[in-house]
Image: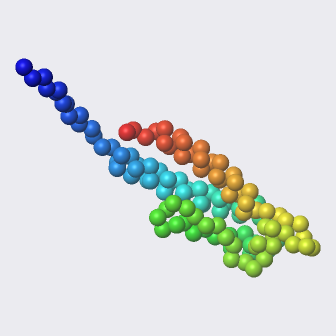
């Protein structure tokens, strides 16, 4: 009498592609939201005299939605942010990025917890 091992096939539902899509959607949504938040924070922080620097703080969101760039179109924006030999730095972009980064991480965690796999 021969003894044969019985093999059982396990059927797994591959949910990884669906999970990846959901996570990417959450990230893209949050990146756009927080790019706008960072821009608002920077505009509120910048020193205001004529309004030129404030009105020229811009954002560009990556076409894939995985990142963004914040910048100013004025020649003197970097001098205000970083300071010069004759003027102390008055940062407005870096603190805004830091604050929105903290909120972004918190939002990703809370949105990730809401996912139904």
Query: Is residue 79 shown to the viewer in this render?
Result: yes
Q: Which residue is drawn at 44% across and 53% down?
A: 25
Quadrant assignment, res 88: bottom right
Query: Is residue 55 shown to the viewer in this render?
Result: no
Q: Which residue lies furthest to the bottom in this view?
A: 75
- Looking at the picture, tell me which residue is in the foreground, 40 or 91: 91
- Looking at the picture, tell me which residue is in the foreground, 74 or 9: 9
Residue 90 placed where, x, y %? 83, 64
Q: Residue at x 85, y 69 (%)?
A: 83
Q: Residue at x 30, y 43 (%)?
A: 14
Residue 74 placed where, x, y %? 73, 78
- Looking at the picture, tell me which residue is in the foreground, 100 or 11: 11
Quadrant assignment, res 31: bottom right
Residue 19 placed where, x, y %? 38, 46
Quadrant assignment, res 67: bottom right
Q: In which quarter of the image is the N terminus?
A: top left
Q: Residue at x 60, y 60 (%)?
A: 36
How many tags in the picture?
0
From the viewer's perspective, is residue 40 above or below residue 99?
below
Q: Residue furthest left?
A: 1
Q: Is residue 64 left or right of residue 11?
A: right
- Looking at the picture, tell me which residue is in the foreground, 19 or 30: 19
Q: Residue furthest top?
A: 1
Residue 117 placed where, x, y %? 37, 39
Q: What coloring was used for the rendering? A: rainbow
Q: Which residue lies furthest to the right in this view?
A: 86
From the viewer's perspective, is residue 25 above or below residue 91?
above
Q: Is residue 23 left or right of residue 82?
A: left
């Amino acid at each position: 009498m021969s003894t044969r091992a019985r093999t059982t096939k396990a059927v797994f539902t591959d949910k990884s592609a669906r999970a990846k899509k959901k996570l990417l959607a959450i990230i893209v949504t949050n990146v756009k939201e927080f790019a706008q938040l960072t821009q608002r924070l920077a505009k509120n922080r910048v020193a205001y005299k004529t309004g030129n620097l404030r009105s020229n703080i811009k954002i560009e969101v990556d076409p894939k939605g995985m990142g963004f760039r914040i910048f100013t179109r004025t020649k003197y924006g970097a001098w205000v942010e970083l300071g010069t030999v004759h003027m102390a730095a008055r940062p407005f972009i870096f603190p805004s990025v830091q604050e929105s980064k903290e909120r972004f991480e918190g939002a990703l965690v809370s949105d990730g917890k809401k996912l139904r796999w």
